[in-house]
């Protein structure tokens, strides 16, 4: 009798183990915020200047790379008004190639407006393709749905020279999303060529077509307009801009507008897409103390009450050759 009870006990135990549900802990991937200077490094490697024969210029960002024989085919995303005159001859001044044998210099590439430029309908966007044997970095496309009010963003491009900065210089500025104009209570008929994101970054004429990066260095919008006191936004090309005073708010087209037009961007143009949410905190901070030959490194864990990695109320502006 005791032996039978023992067998029953074992049987119940085995049955319990067999029917118990298996719990699988799903890993949720999140992009990590990086320092502003690291986003700036991404921008400097991917942002291009677009020039025309009429003397105007704008900006753009490399978003894709594919291969054709021994050549690389690159895709640049910009604002359509930067390349709006088909009769003009346009050229791209690239970032410094990753495999440059000629020193740290940019490359100028002439474009055929009919063959290399395609305007996206119903929105102020255009894609430009160019061919090169050089290797350039490509920007990662993010998810503009996460770019809500208060999110830190960065704008990069090549603005028109001013009184103090008298030459064309790469500029990288910080700010935050101040408004989403595509909320459900807005009238679709009043949409302004797709400019649905407003932000506080400093921008100038010539930065039109440049990218808007999130805190992880992913492209979430294309910059193209500056709000002005006369309630008419001005296109930020380097000629023909309105002289009315800017309000400080600027506008960009969410990157999702491009992905709606080109949902297979990763396959068609070789784009890199990361739609994951953004985690604004790192796992740890590492401090290195000491001399070049003798260092002491210690990691400090970050707790949820720690302050943000950077202060988005301060403008981070840099210029390069």
Image (cartoon, grey):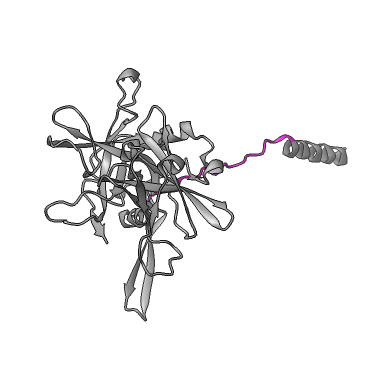
Question: Can the viewer see residue 127 in this picture?
Answer: yes
Q: Position of residue 223 (x, y in %)?
A: 31, 40
Residue nearest the viewer, comparing 142 with 66: 66
Which image quadrant is residue 285 in?
Answer: bottom left
| Residue reaching furthest to the front | 87
Which image quadrant is residue 244 in?
Answer: top left
Q: Is residue 278 above or below residue 296?
A: above
Question: Can the viewer see residue 303 in this picture?
Answer: no
Residue at 44%, 43% in the rendered image? 116
Residue at 27%, 41% in the rendered image? 176
How many tags in the picture? 0
Q: Position of residue 115 (x, y in %)?
A: 46, 42
Q: Is residue 140 left or right of residue 160?
A: right
* Magenta range: 19-34
Q: Quadrant of the C terminus?
A: bottom left
Specify whether residue 66 is painted magenta.
no
Q: Position of residue 283 (x, y in %)?
A: 42, 54
Q: Is residue 1 left or right of residue 80?
A: right
Q: Is residue 267 left or right of residue 39?
A: right
Residue at 58%, 42% in the rendered image? 25
Q: Is residue 129 left or right of residue 6?
A: left
| Residue reaching furthest to the bottom | 293
Magenta highlight: main SS: loop
Q: Quadrant of the N terminus?
A: top right
Residue nearest the viewer, comparing 127 with 30: 127
Q: Position of residue 222 (x, y in %)?
A: 35, 40
Residue nearest the viewer, comparing 16 with 287: 287
């Amino acid at each position: 009798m005791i032996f039978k009870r023992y067998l029953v006990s074992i049987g119940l135990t085995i049955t319990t183990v067999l029917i118990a549900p298996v719990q699988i802990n799903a890993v949720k991937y999140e992009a990590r915020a990086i320092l502003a200077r690291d986003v700036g490094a991404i921008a400097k490697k991917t942002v291009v200047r677009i020039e025309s024969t009429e003397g105007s210029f704008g900006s753009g960002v490399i978003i894709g790379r594919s291969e054709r024989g021994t050549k690389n085919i690159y895709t640049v995303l910009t604002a359509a008004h930067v390349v709006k005159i088909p009769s003009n001859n346009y050229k791209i001044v690239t970032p410094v190639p990753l495999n440059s044998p000629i020193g740290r210099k940019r490359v100028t590439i002439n474009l055929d407006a009919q063959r290399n430029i395609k305007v996206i309908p119903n929105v102020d966007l255009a894609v430009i393709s160019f061919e090169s044997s050089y290797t350039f970095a490509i920007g990662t496309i993010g998810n503009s749905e996460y770019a809500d009010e208060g999110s830190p963003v960065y704008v990069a491009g090549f603005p028109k020279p001013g009184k103090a900065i008298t030459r064309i210089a790469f500029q990288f500025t910080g700010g935050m999303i101040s408004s989403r104009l595509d909320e459900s209570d807005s009238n679709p008929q009043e949409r302004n060529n797709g400019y649905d994101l407003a932000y506080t970054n400093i921008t100038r004429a010539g930065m039109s077509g440049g990218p808007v990066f999130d805190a992880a260095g992913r492209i979430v919008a294309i910059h193209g307009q500056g709000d002005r006191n006369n309630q008419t936004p001005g296109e930020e090309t380097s000629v023909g801009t309105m002289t009315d005073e800017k309000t400080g708010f600027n506008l960009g087209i969410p990157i999702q507008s491009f992905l709606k037009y080109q949902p297979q961007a990763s396959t068609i143009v070789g784009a890199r897409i990361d739609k994951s949410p953004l985690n604004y905190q790192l796992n740890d901070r590492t401090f290195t103390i000491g001399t070049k030959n003798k260092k002491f490194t210690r990691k400090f864990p970050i707790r949820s009450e720690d302050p943000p990695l950077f202060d988005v109320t301060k403008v981070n502006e840099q210029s390069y050759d």
